[in-house]
Amino acid sequence: MKVLVTGAAGFIGGQLCHALWKRGDTVIGIDNFSYGNLDNLHFDDHDFAADVLRMDIRDREELPALFEREHFDVVYNIAGIAPLPDCQSDPVEAVSVNTMGLVNLLELCRRTGVKHLVQASTNAMYENETEFPTVEDKFNPPTLIYPNTKYCGEQFCRSFADTYNMNVTCLRFANVYGPHIDCLRKQPPFVGYMIRELYYDRVPEFHSDGNQRRDYIYVDDLIDLALRVTDRKGFDAVNVSSNTNYSVRELYAIACRLMHKDIEAKYWDTAHYWAKYPELYGGAYGIRPEILDHEVNKYSLCDNAHAKELYGWQPQVSIEEGLARVIEAECAMLAARDAAAAKE
């Protein structure tokens, strides 16, 4: 099969390219490198740097030419702007990339006969749900910009599937973790941040009381499901989750034990977190504090029965095994980075 992966230089996109390549597929990746990093394309058995084109999913000239030239069988759209503060601070850009970029891909798939498009969606669209575990076909619509860009994107996916008889699957990711997780950006994912601070023997700063619970999914388990869904006809939306959640305190305790650290974390009021993003409060109408408080303290737990029943999928990696793998990979990366910096 010939497969296109967008966002290929990201944490998930790079590992998806690797899995597809190992399966024997011909893989072409694109990334505009606004968030992607070449480090995510280096693997022991293959370097994908030469296989990834610098291109934006909103492109209206080079991208159509690529589709016409390559005749892809499957497209995985992993590209997008995910950090919530980035989306809230620049909603026009967030909608342009996450929603309009997707529509551009859908139309190119329609024109060139792509057999299946798989869209990276999110369990963040369940942010206003109060009944758990959350299921795919019954939930309250989201409020914030990021989940709304994905929610609207799913409506376009369904529209194209219903209107043109196309095959489109939206995978609603829980909190994804694994090797190559981005721990260096301004607002890294919780797992990446936690391991980075422990590696440098710094005191991690968390927010609220640490009892807020989220569900997590290891990247290999996510990719396993992503590879299974492309035989499905029509439209589908699927939770990609472990159906188990963990608190900040529980994950931190596991990480400390695995890293042989005894550092007490500092817990701040939720307002301390958002103080790093003054742009959210600017303008005539600033964001409501209770919205931000809810975002920090929200509870997530996604039902994965649909994925199990329809695709025969079962997550395999426990949270302890998964964290151990991430710790090994991230510590090695940080050590190599520091060694390189010392030589300069």
Image (cartoon, rainbow, N blue to C red):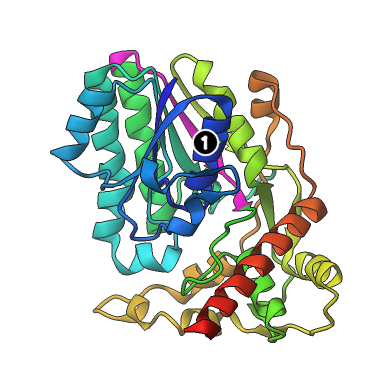
Residue 243 position in % (x across, y down):
73, 42
Residue name at image x 55 percent, y 72 percent: 293
Within 10 Å of disc 1 (Cα), the crowding (few <14, some 14-19, many 20+) is many
Residue name at image x 22 percent, y 44 percent: 58
Residue name at image x 80 percent, y 52 percent: 321
Residue 188 position in % (x across, y down):
53, 68
Residue 97 position in % (x across, y down):
29, 50
Left or right relative to 217: residue 186: left
> Is 99 colored magenta in this rendering?
no
Q: Looking at the figure, which quarter contains the N terminus?
A: top left
Left or right relative to 325: residue 129: left
Kindly identify the amino acid type of the residue bearing the numbered disc 1.
Leu
- Magenta part, dominant SS: strand
Residue 48 shows up from this direction: yes
Q: Is 199 or 120 nearer to us in this picture?
A: 199
Residue 134 shows up from this direction: no
Q: Is 39 or 240 nearer to us in this picture?
A: 39
Residue 203, picture quadrant = bottom right
Q: Is residue 207 above or below residue 11?
A: below
Q: Is residue 207 above or below residue 54?
A: below
Q: Is 68 or 176 nearer to us in this picture?
A: 68
Q: Is residue 278 above or below residue 98?
A: below
Which SS class for mark 1? strand
**According to the image, label 1 marks what residue?**
171
Across the whole image, how many numbered discs are drawn on residues? 1
> Is 170 colored magenta in this rendering?
yes
- The residue stretch that appears in magenta: 164-176
Left or right relative to 167: residue 321: right
Residue 316, picture quadrant = top right
Q: Residue furthest toward the left?
A: 61
